[in-house]
Image: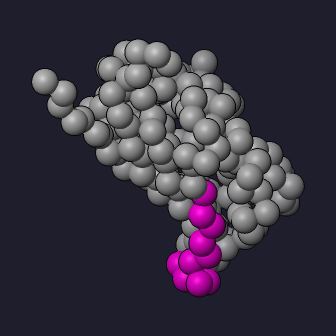
């Protein structure tokens, strides 16, 4: 009997901004005079999506997979970490169907880089770019995001059982 089995996961991440660009978001180096500080490359979009897809299969989280105490993860390409999470999803019997991301940043404007980010993420998630949504929001000048101290990112991912043809 066919059993409908759709999984949904949520991920959140935030990183502090520091002087000097570029700004790496969703695997894309955006021209900007600040960058996100992290043990890895600080890509909050990739980290939020990684946690969303891991969460959807009960597969732990990015901190478990990639310890920030491990020197091997220093400056690590976050799309590479996302690819490892995609592998874990696959071995759990699922594949990514769709991802929706909200980036909360006072600057820069995300819309100008949306297509590049969708393309970069689609390649790693093994979906069409049309299955990835990236939305930029400001925080209306409020709080630490409004003061430009950092960027936050929310991601929701939908997973479906593996298609044996894929
Ligand atoms: Mg992070």
Decide if residue 137 is on the left or right side of residue 50: right
Residue 138 falls inside the magenta stretch: yes
> Looking at this rendering, what residue extends furthest in the front direction?
1
Q: Is residue 83 above or below residue 154?
A: above
Residue placed most toward the observer, 127 or 154: 127
Residue 97 falls inside the magenta stretch: no
Q: Measuring 70% from the left and 48% from the top, which residue is drawn there?
A: 117
What's the image's color scheme? one colour
Q: Quadrant of the N terminus?
A: top left
Q: Is residue 103 above or below residue 132?
A: below
Q: Measuring 61% from the left and 39% from the top, which residue is drawn there?
A: 128
Residue placed most toward the observer, 60 or 67: 60
Decide if residue 33 is on the left or right side of residue 127: right
Q: Image quarter for residue 127? A: top right
Q: How many marks?
A: 0
Any part of residue 19 in sight: no
Q: Is residue 55 above or below residue 73?
A: below
Residue placed most toward the observer, 87 or 34: 87
Residue 114 placement (x, y as % from top left): 71, 56
Q: Image quarter for residue 92? A: top left
Residue 159 placement (x, y as % from top left): 37, 37
Residue placed most toward the observer, 29 or 69: 29
Q: Measuring 71% from the left and 63% from the top, which residue is drawn there?
A: 110
Q: Measuring 27% from the left and 32% from the top, which residue is drawn there?
A: 58
Residue 16 placement (x, y as % from top left): 61, 56
Q: Which residues are magenta?
A: 134-143
Any part of residue 159 in sight: yes
Residue 6 placement (x, y as % from top left): 28, 39
Decide if residue 26 is on the left or right side of residue 98: right
């Amino acid at each position: 009997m066919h059993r409908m089995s759709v999984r949904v996961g949520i991920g959140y991440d935030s990183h502090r901004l520091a002087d000097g660009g570029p700004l790496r978001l969703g695997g894309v180096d955006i021209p900007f005079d600040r960058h996100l500080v992290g043990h890895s490359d600080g890509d909050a979009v990739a980290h939020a999506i990684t946690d969303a897809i891991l969460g959807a299969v009960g597969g732990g989280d990015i901190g478990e997979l990639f310890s920030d105490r491990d020197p091997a993860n220093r400056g690590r390409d976050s799309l590479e970490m996302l690819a490892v999470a995609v592998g874990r999803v696959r071995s759990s019997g699922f594949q990514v169907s769709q991802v929706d991301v909200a980036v909360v940043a006072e600057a820069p404007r995300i819309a100008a880089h949306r297509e590049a980010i969708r393309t970069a993420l689609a390649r790693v998630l093994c979906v069409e770019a049309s299955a990835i949504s990236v939305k930029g929001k400001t925080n209306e000048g409020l709080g630490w995001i409004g003061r430009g101290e950092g960027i936050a990112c929310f991601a929701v991912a939908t997973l479906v059982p593996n298609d044996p043809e894929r």
